[in-house]
Image: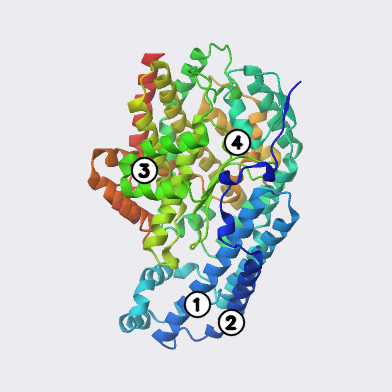
Amino acid sequence: MCKKNLKTRDQIDSKHKWDIESMYPDEGTWDEDCGRAAALAEGFVRFSGRLGESPEALLAAFRERDELWLVAERAYVYARMKRDEDNKLAKYQAMSDKCQSLVAKAAAATSFFTPELLEIPESALFDFMSREDGLKLYEFAIMNTLRLKSHVLTKPEENIMAQYSEITGATGDIFAMLNNADIKFGTIKDEDGCEVELTHGRYVGFMESKDRRVRKESFEHMYTAYKNQINTIASAYNYNTKTDVVTARIRKYESSLHSALAGDNIPLSVYDNLISVVNQNLNTLHRYMSLRKRVLNLDELQMYDVYVPLIDVPKEDIPYETAASILEAGLAPLGPDYISKMKEGLSAGWVDVYENAGKTSGAYSFGSYDSKPFILLNYEGKLKDVFTLAHEMGHSMHSKYTRAAQPFIYGGHSIFTAEVASTVNESLLMKHLLSVEKNPDTKKYLLNMYIEEFRTTLFRQTMFAEFERATHQAAESGEALTAEWLSDEYGKLNQKYFGCDVATCGDIRCEWARIPHFYSAFYVYKYATGFSAAAAISDLILSGAGARDSYVEFLKSGESDHPIELLKIAGVDMSSPAPVELAMKTFENLIEEFEKLV
């Protein structure tokens, strides 16, 4: 009997690890940064009561606030990423916790800034900006603060909210530790009869297995583990949602959804239109499920049958270096400057490639303003992993361009725009592979994979968004989010989205319990809107260099304007339902094309 165990961190080749040590070659410097950030936080109080004294005083406060957050961010990012390398290591758990406290301290120290800024008469602020050239940099930030004036509390109240931030984030941290360090899914037998440990990283691969026994066994093991913890997880999610609701009420928002959208100045209609348009087109998803049932030749389609590819392709293991070459060819329409920067990053320690014991599951792009734009992967050599690399590289290249073009205050991205940058890469890669593939069966496989992109991103993330809207509305009306209520609500939504050709399965009712993004409320809808925007932008890029140049200008824009306005630079207006409707039409066309081939 063969048994495959995960490698430990020290068994991974250094060339396949991120160069996080470039942030702090000596961890003593990390301690110094923590101390420096703490000192800056303590010293920042001297600006309290002085912001309206003069334009020079206001500019000095803005600049010192930027310095404080830059240093605190750098220390936090390093500690969090070191923890993610191996969640079992107490040292980095402690360092991450220390940085959580540091961030809370910085938030408390700067909490007076916004309410005091809003106490300055608008006429005086405009006068300050006209007299002090240095304040021109902060004009958008000032105007954006004025926009949210009615939701900013008094200075003492903001200080209390800042100090409580360390506590209000606890539910997400509790779930993360349970999900990444404590929960175990046991072992299963893979297609070759080998006993393997079931992990987050391996689960999706098993769900794509052509062996139905492997899919069923993986599904049952995964959900048994979550059902065994269901009440604990429900309690964490219940209080996470209550935190959103109470915070929104304190800040005088109509609802927690209004509160979540306000920061990016996203109209509520964007969220509601997404759910509405997708619901209007569920019949096309049901049509695909019926086709899936027929092609798989199943009497009953189970939820563990919805991920397996419908087209057989030769089993292949794509080496990571080959994936990088595929990426270079697929993203060539973005131009030589983009490709040059990307290749440099791939060889300069941006990417942590393989899964190891204790490593955080999934994938992400992360970094501080003055670090490399790092990428965490759990690469397994599948084609889907190549697309994950493309996705995360989209985020990292977005960061690369933005940080070179924008000052610290505008050097980040809203999730609304970030998901566009990542998904444009996926869209371009898919269109490239479809255009060069000569093997008919492989081409059908790619077409099916593209259909799955729509299902898992546009439909699935919208279903998640609808679930979040329902849970927050229930909490706002005083309903307790028990494990039974959450599972019932999720089960009904799952049945609505997948239709009558998919058997109702008790276990899928618990899927909500394994979604980390639910601990960042109203986050997932941005995957769906981003997917819709990216589909339109990739078409524009392939139509000519002018659109490519406009897209690169968008990548450089950071947070220098509201997301809806920034996307207009790239040629897309997300305030209209048109991009989602166009994506739904594309999905229907793909289904029709695939039906003819199979």
Badge 2 marks a residue whose secondary structure is: helix
Residue 64's label in the rendered image is: 1
Among the two numbered marks 2 and 4 on one chain, the one whose residue lies closer to the N terminus: 2
Mark pair 2, 4: CA separation: 49 Å
Q: Which residue is mark 4?
A: 490
Of labels 3 and 1, the one closer to you: 1
Residue 361's label in the rendered image is: none
Residue 43's label in the rendered image is: 2
Mark pair 1, 4: CA separation: 46 Å
Judge by depth and name the residue closer to the eye, 577 or 386: 386
The residue carrying pointer 3 sits among few (fewer than 14), some (14 to 19) or many (20 or more) residues within 10 Å by Cα, namely many
Q: Residue at x 34, y 26 (%)?
A: 436
* Amino acid at the residue labelled 3: Ala
Callout 3–callout 2 Cβ contact below 8 Å: no
* Amino acid at the residue labelled 2: Gly
Q: Residue at x 54, y 73 (%)?
A: 68
Give the color scheme: rainbow, by chain, secondary structure or one colour: rainbow
Asked if residue 403 is positioned above or below residue 445 in the image, the reply reads: below
* Amino acid at the residue labelled 4: Tyr
Q: Which residue is mark 3?
A: 533
Q: Position of residue 332 (x, y in %)?
A: 33, 40
Badge 3 marks a residue whose secondary structure is: helix
Q: Position of residue 399 (x, y in %)?
A: 44, 55
Q: Position of residue 471 (x, y in %)?
A: 59, 45
